[in-house]
Amino acid sequence: MNRTEPSDVLVFFGATGDLARKMIFPSLYGMVVADELHVPVVGVAFSQWGIDDLRRRARESVEAAVPEVDEDALERLLGLLRYVDGDYRDAATFDALKESVGDAHRPVHYLAIPPVMFATVVEGLARAGLNRHARVVVEKPFGRDLASAQELDAVVREAFPEESVFRIDHYLGKEEIMNLLYFRFANSFLEPVWNRQHVASVQITIAEDFGVQGRGSFYESAGALRDVLENHMLQIVALLAMEPPAYQGYGAVHEAKANVFRAIRPLTRNDIVRGQFEGYRDEPGVARGSDVETFAAVRLFIDSWRWAGVPWYLRTGKNMPVTAHEVVVEFKKPPQALFDDAMMAQHPNHLRFRLKPDPEIALGARVKTPGEEFVGEQRELVAATGDTAAREPYERLLGDAIQGDRALFTSEDSVEAAWRVVDAILTDHAPAIRYAPGTWGPTEADTLIGADGPWHDPSLRDSNGRK
């Protein structure tokens, strides 16, 4: 299949599942509204449903997610839907799918299903010949560790060439994440200071002010390390730390990101603090003596020419004081103490990327306060980047998969290199430390960041919008 030739049918497994209800149907509707979805959409699941049931679910999903529904667009979406009901382990299901696909010759198969079923579905597609001239979209997580990621890749690559494999992480489709890459390389002023000579440290926080929300059984199988740090947070690290791509194209970006992962020093038990919020073990589906972390803070180093010696601090957690995704790049202090108050300031200069909520980019600097004394205060120059009209990540990513554009997807090299960073600490770690909901996690995380701290608090404000 020509990698730039659009697919002529979208097949998505897991059509009756939670992801489809919350994300996929509203995104398909958005694609119809934008006049970007014209191909048949074949839902596949094992729920003893029919096409009327699927259309009813699609309507309910869209109406729950969209304030003002365009009825004509919704009817067009419903008209594109087809449905195949059957067990993924039964060859007859794939025979029925082949019949439903009909005359389409370039399908894209989206696996919105639990990872344990990936191999079963891929093998079923291959047996039915539905892998020929086709693409496959694999939903994260890509394995549970390095070994399982490699096993999954072997199964997928047996049926599909690498250029036809789209590993989807919806986080990469967010406008604010794409803006990190754009900001890095669309502005020439940043490059001279974006290195170990000028950067003192980097902090990345992904905090949520809620718990596991009834998804205890899922979280027991994932934890903060697998659910957020290994994928979302390391992807942010890669976008910030990567070298300029050698050419304009997704292949160059993938290679530059993979090189960052290869340069990250594998984490050890001394590089991590794990926490678990009080009350987690009372959640449905959670083991009574669970040691799964709902908070993780790590310190990592990138052994590259650009970043050698610069510590990167990452923390993520549930039941934090606020929901916020933020990056703070701290610059080194001036080399000479001309003004005492400036030298005493903990973070005199920084660049801050607010990803969520209310995306913005801010440059922090000290300015003199009025009067005869040479004293100043910390201020920020803020550029708001939020856009209420921005597309939902799945709209962008599913549209890209149909078109064959792999720019916002993850390569297998990157997947394996990222797992190598965290593989050891998945099992070699100290017990999770209990912390109270509404706090920033165990105080041991403050010891981890040490003299490079304190941790930046995304909830604070100052006279210029920050405190």
Image (tube, rainbow, N blue to C red):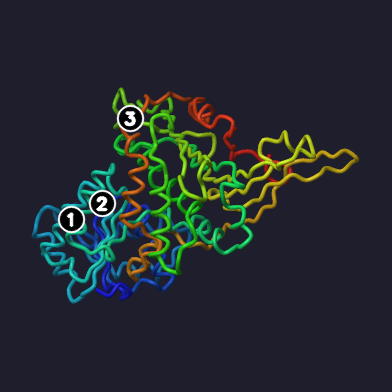
| Of the two numbered discs 3 and 2 in the rendering, the one whose residue sits closer to the viewer | 3
Which image quarter: residue 458?
A: top right
The image position of residue 240, as x and y in percent, is 51, 52
Label 1 vs 3, first from the N-terminus? 1
- Quadrant that contains the N terminus: bottom left
Label 1, on which residue? 121
User: Mark 3 and mark 2: span between their CA atoms?
Assistant: 29 Å
Label 3 vs 2, first from the N-terminus? 2
Marks 1 and 3: CB-CB under 8 Å?
no
The image position of residue 80, as x and y in percent, is 29, 70
Mark 2, Cα crowd under 10 Å, few <14 / some 14-19 / many 20+, is many
Label 3, on which residue? 428
Residue 265 or 390: which is nearer the viewer?
265
Marks 2 and 1: CB-CB under 8 Å?
yes
Left or right: 255, with 46 as reference point: right
Label 2, on which residue? 113
